[in-house]
Image (spheres, grey):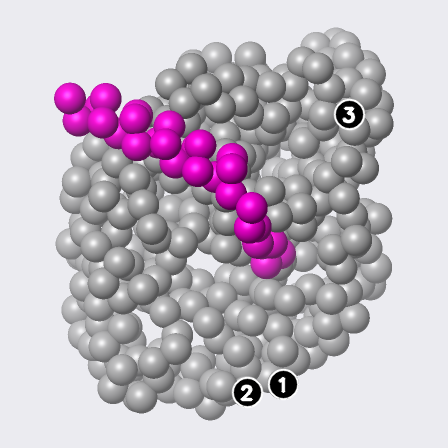
Amino acid sequence: MTFSFNILALTFLSLLTTTAITSSTTTIGVTYKPSSSPNLPTPEHVASTLQSLHIPAVHLLHPTPASIRAFAYSNISLLLTIPNSFISSFAANRSSSTDWLYNHVLPFYPRARISLISVGNDVVSSSELDPTNSDPSTVLLPAMRNLNLSLGDLGIKNIRVSTTFSFIKVMEQLFPPSTAGFLEPIDKVIIKPVLQFLDDNNSSFLIDVVPYDVYKLHSEIPIGFALFQENPFNFRDDGNTAVRYRNLFDMMVDGVVASLANSGHQNIRIIVTRTGWPSSSSISGYVEAEASQLFAEMYLKGLIAHMKSGMGTPLRKDGVAEVYIYELFDEEDDNNPNSSSSVMSARNGSRSDKTGEHQWGILYPNMTMKFDLDFSGSEKASGIKFAGWVGLFLWIFGEIVFWLL
């Protein structure tokens, strides 16, 4: 009875969003992990370049005081992600979270426009927690509460607190989106308490949504569907809601929308903290045909055009509130717990069980663009129709190369 009611509610929601006359565009930002490498530009140079590219928001992974200071007076909004290694100490002692704020926030806010702080990233599968207190179900929410209380103690009321999940680590199924749910026991012991905290504090649900990872895990997904390419074969229908999906990103986001609704928290904003497509890979001499500069540019152009169109998703007309492209500079991600390679061997129907590095960067170290991307909002969704046929042809060629290697 509950399942039928939820399907009915989601169907009604999809009808409402289809007939809505208002729409909003999503804030498109980029992910930046500060580095001390002499081969990469300074945070000040990065901040200046991002301003010139009209990028309004930055997701700072492992933020340093110097990197936060660089964005002061820049009018660029900042989302800070605290490393997982801090979570246990935050949970055990509120003074630890206060000390972190004294070093990373208080000296720069509000000159640096910090809007949200994520307590960790993909904590449910992290190996970076304190070994003496490494159960995320016992440390994550206390750490979030203590950080939130510390912000209040310092008189900071406009910075929200959340945590980041990974789609492929917490979602029970991909299709149909209307029947999606969070994995157990993660849902009961971690996600539901976190959702209540987010609702109580007017915060957002943060999640990594990377179609490339899902595409690599599901061999039946057409490449064009994952790359926002419009052609007659790129769609999937949800029989429960009569919704037709034209791209994998929307299908994944609506799975999250349905899961939030099934948990009784349908009004929480969704922020996609990580999305992108690798432009190359290196796996012990093995080359992944799908990890190419051509496909990466197709995905990113399609994503930007779709976000700027204001179309939202079938189940959420306003779409996601913010989306962050991963990442500014190439970085080896063979230890990245969110990548498909880290879970490939545990899933059936995958295209490959090999692991290795992928390059996700959109800028070269000299701060020139790797792709022809326009963050100003002038790109239109219709502009990718022709590219869809090109992508279809190139994919046929790519598949031949892929299986011959």
Determine which residue is flagged by label 3: 388
- Residue 177 in the image, given as x and y percentages of width and height: 41, 27
Q: Is residue 14 above or below residue 201?
A: above
Q: Left or right: where does residue 371 sit relative to residue 14?
A: right
Q: Earlier in the sequence, mark 1 or mark 2?
A: 1
Q: Position of residue 127 (x, y in %)?
A: 33, 48
Q: Which residue has dot 1 on it?
A: 73
Per the image, is 151 magenta?
no
Mark 3 is on which residue type?
A: Gly
**Label of residue 111 in the image:** 2
Residue 116 picture location, percent across and down? 43, 68
Bounds of the magenta span? 1-28
C-alpha span from label 3 to label 1: 41 Å
Residue at 66% x, 42% y: name it: 306
Please tell me whether mark 2 sits on a helix, a strand or a loop.
loop
Name the amino acid type tagged 1: Tyr
